[in-house]
Amino acid sequence: MISPSKTNETLELTRVGADTWSQSEVTHREMQGSQPAALDRHRQASLSKIRQTCTLAADRDGLEYAWVDTCCIDKTNLAELAEAINSMWAWYRRAAVCYVFLEDLLPGGDVELERDLRSCRWFTRGWTLQELLAPRRVEFFDREWRHRGSKSDLAELLYEITKIPERVLRGEADVGEFAVAARMSWASRRETTRTEDLAYCLLGIFDVNMPLNYGEGEKAFTRLQMAILQTVAEMSIFLWTDDRTPCPPYAGMLAESPRQFASCHDIENTLGDAASCNFTIATSGIQTNIIQVINLRRNERAWGVAMETLCHMEGTLVGVGVRKIGAGLFLRIHPDRLIGLGSLGASMDQVKRLGYSRPPMEPVTLATRLLPRYPFHPSGDPVRGNRWSALQVNWGPIKPMTHSSQPLSHWDPDDEVFFTHLPHAEGWCSFIVRGSLVFDPVEQPLSTQPPSTFLVACFRWNYGVPTVVVARLDDVNPAMRALFELQLEQLQFDQCLMAELLTMGILDNQLQEEWIESAPRPVKYWTNTPVRSGRTTQLSIKLSTRQNTPLCGTSVFTIHIVPKHSSLESTFRTGGEHKHNRASVIPGGLGTTSAPILAVRRR
């Protein structure tokens, strides 16, 4: 008996009843002794299996060497053990044949084989998965060493037992052709004695290497997934589901175990999209670019924002629910389900009819775990506990048709708020909205204006003296407006002064300055919004602040856009009829504001 690392000969490998060995198996040290025949009675049974393996290798297949892991690996030598585990897939791949001795398979015919093979322990063990997949030739033997068939001959039955596609079992397809989630599903019902081995036994299947660290527990599987992300350019690894009851509302983006991929055997990658899947492992999580799918019919579906994975299941695109909890930082929400995102190959019109919106691709960080606590709220809610304050716009007479929000890192499309995750951040935010004006029938006859483009921006809402800008952009040169929008997209949240200078620059000599007396601090307000509707009118703003909302840890600052000289309450009655108006979904309604409705005066 010799180790494969010591020879260049073609190898024969066998794992006699692999990973169903008892504690009485012959070890490497005992095989190195001068008298293996003198082993005790229990060891003699193990020695008999090794001898039978060698006899089969020599007589049946004309091979010179055999390799059995229990006695060919010195498991007391950690360096040798690590090398063996990281190399085992390659060793099996190079083998001439692999013998599988099933000590719990009774002798019988084909009918008995189809019935009894399903219950063999060999199909429930983690380490045996690579023994089935890696060798090009696998032969099965029952407890009396009678040959019962090969991997290729039994492919159909083996598929029913393992859900591994017959093409793989017959050698017609390589395991690397299948999605990561599908490969994980092959291990979802397998077990190992050591928790860490549930990750280590999958190294070869995903063609990755990593150091062993027995004692790390489930962290080993997290490390495996991170190693896969740095090797395989696809996103199916995020398509796991949590099978716990009750299921927690939030989770990290990575699975805790192969068990959570049990329903993924039909997952396939969408061809041609792998180039966009690049991942960087950082302290805070996985950095990548994602496509978000916004659900515009939240009253019909139980999710708000999903992450596209560029994968499909039986012709339906699938994604996972995500929730933005910090600056570009996402967690998994509703981890007990996958989300269908329409048919594969659906046109943009078909996607719109489903009520889905796909904003531009966004650079994000995907958090890999939940923290035990978050800084701004003791409840443990990662959304409320990770945001200091938030800003919201109530559009009032503006009925938005399309809008862009910057900076994306601090915009939550689920709650439709901007937020800051620092108490003293001098941040900024802006909306560029294309929409119509719908006036209050109580104030004047109902009149809908042609669509206009509006800019709503706020600077330092969280700290210092806030500045609010509400302006029409219809008179701005289209080329200048496009350049302005592009420049805003390049700015970070903390580049407040630069954003303010750009905004004031594009609206040079067009703005009127007003001040709003506010508690605890005044607000500067700039506008250029004359609107004709039978008579000259102007858009104005009202402000409110509300505490103890689920949107953040402290307070939500709300900008209410109203026609000047109209009452705030009547505007809400009209705006409440439009699905884009957010006042109706603020918990507690207008009456729970902690700051009074504010008057406007000329400075």
Image (cartoon, rainbow, N blue to C red):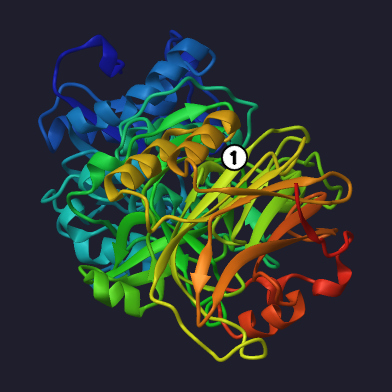
Tell me which residue sits at (19%, 52%) in the image: 168
Residue 125 visible at all: yes
Number of numbered labels in the structure image: 1
**Residue 509, above or below 323:** above
Tell me which residue sits at (46%, 34%) in the image: 287
Instruction: Identify residue type, mark 1.
Output: Ala
Say which residue label 1 marks: 327
Frontmost residue, 145 versus 520: 520
From the viewer's perspective, is 516 left or right of 222? Answer: right
For the N terminus, the image quarter is: top left
Residue 127 visible at all: no
From the viewer's perspective, is 355 left or right of 397? Answer: left
Tell me which residue sits at (59%, 38%) in the image: 195
From the viewer's perspective, is 185 left or right of 298? Answer: left
Mark 1 lies on a secondary structure that is loop
Tell me which residue sits at (38%, 67%) in the image: 116
Frontmost residue, 263 versus 396: 396
**Residue 34, above or below 517:** above
Frontmost residue, 161 versus 255: 255
* Residue 379 point in image, percent of width and height: 84, 53
**Residue 78, above or below 405:** above
* Residue 284 point in image, percent of width and height: 59, 31
Residue 551 found in image quarter: bottom right
* Residue 236 point in image, percent of width and height: 37, 51
Frontmost residue, 370 versus 52: 370
Classed neighbour count for the residue bearing mark 1: other residues with Cα under 10 Å, few (<14), some (14–19), many (≥20):
many
* Residue 316 point in image, percent of width and height: 30, 71
